[in-house]
Image (cartoon, rainbow, N blue to C red):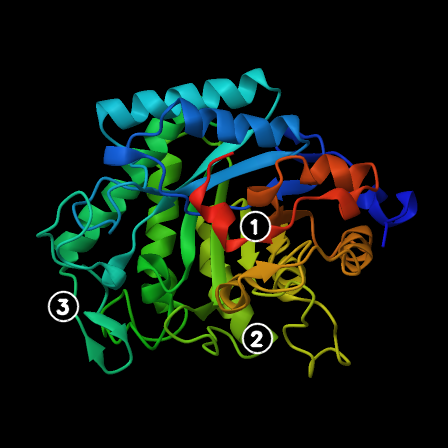
Amino acid sequence: MTTTTAATDPLFKSFALGSLVLPNRLVMAPMTRSFSPGGVPGADVAAYYARRVKGGVGLILTEGTLVAHPAAGNDPKVPSFYGEAALAGWGHVVDAVHAAGGHIMPQLWHVGSMRRRGDGPNPEAPPVSPSGLFKPGKVVGEPATLAEIDTLIAAFAESAGHAHRLGFDGIEIHGAHGYLIDQFFWAGTNVRTDRYGGGLAGRTTFAAEIVKACRAATAPDFPIVLRFSQWKQQDYAARLATNPSELATFLAPLVDAGVDVFHCSNRRFWQPEFPDHDGGSAMNLAGWTKKISGKPVITVGSIGLDTDFIDTFAKKEARNETSHIAQLAGMMERGEIDLAAVGRALIADPDWVEKLRTHRLTDAVPFTREALGRLV
């Protein structure tokens, strides 16, 4: 199956985010690769991202990068976004991407209660999280003290400042998939009764303070993207908001804090978020987020493939899928979404965007689990 020019035109219109002008609407989604020994991205990482720019990607969102906190991650090959050597490596990455004519933002990350003692750059560091919970009923540590929360907020701000100084085009804050910030969002892992807990709006306080701190560490016009999801790795059926009203309660403090773009993570982008509302709306999470917040949005979730990333590990291979591309373009044409993030398809084929533009997706390299073991 091939796509037509009319079906793909909306995906290749430019998009302005303040003074940042992207050549098209296609974004490389952040995907952990673990090719940075000692947390330091090398020339191979710089070349990897630059190749995607040459293949047509409008904006690179890097793999998750660890903020300057001893319990931020588990994997010593996940890149850090602090320390002289790692920051020098990231300087080479941003230079390579800009030399190729691209735009790039680092994703700032902390795993929270998913931390495993004995792993990562600081093996003995205990996990830190809002209530010491991995998921409802599973205790893995102690609730974070107010002093620890201040330290975590400062760690995100420090890395944001580094990104601004190095010449990145913005930052993405990882608030999805059951990691630290999402653990504050989710009632299943946040049972605090202070200002960082309570109802849905209170559970956004930690993220809102991170956004404000990152803004203070950068510049008024430096784009800040926040990624969030309903589902968690701990519970795929989890929901932060069960209806549009609850989603509005969740989004309002984050908009007020200064989020410029919401990156709304679905496992399958084509699935409606609240089908029983607004006359049976077909809008996905990103569509509802834009309607409620008025902010630009990125949608993501199995774009270009027939299997979501979780099922990939059961089926081993995900076939190229073009039937949803026209639906994606239609969502963009109607103004429901602004940008679309492509993940595994771009791991397998750095030229996926160009092949879409020239209607050659049938020639795209299919994604397999083995592709995760290579950085090409």
Whole-percent x, y for residue 293 in the image = 60, 58
Picture mark count: 3
Q: Nearer the viewer, residue 295 or 347?
A: 347
Q: Nearer the viewer, residue 195 or 100?
A: 100
Precedes in sequence: disc 2 or disc 1: 2
Determine the secondary structure under disc 2: helix
Q: Is residue 355 above or below residue 246?
A: above
Q: Is residue 248 above or below residue 257?
A: below
Determine the secondary structure under disc 1: helix
Side (left or right) of 140 relative to 254: left
Precedes in sequence: disc 3 or disc 1: 3
Residue topped by disc 1: 344
User: For the residues marked 3 and 1, what is the alpha-carbon distance in whole angstroms?
Assistant: 33 Å
Residue topped by disc 3: 141
Whole-percent x, y for residue 56 in the image = 68, 31
Determine the secondary structure under disc 3: loop
Residue type indicated by callout 2: Ser
Mark 2 or 1: the one toward you: 1
- Characterize the local packing of mark 3: few (<14), some (14-19) or many (20 or more) Cα atoms within 10 angstroms: some
> What residue lies at 31% left-to-right and 25% top-to-bottom?
87
Residue topped by disc 2: 245
Q: Are marks 3 and 1 in contact (CB under 8 Å)?
A: no
> What residue lies at 55% left-to-right and 67% top-to-bottom?
315
Q: Nearer the viewer, residue 24 or 77?
A: 77
Side (left or right) of 198 relative to 360: left
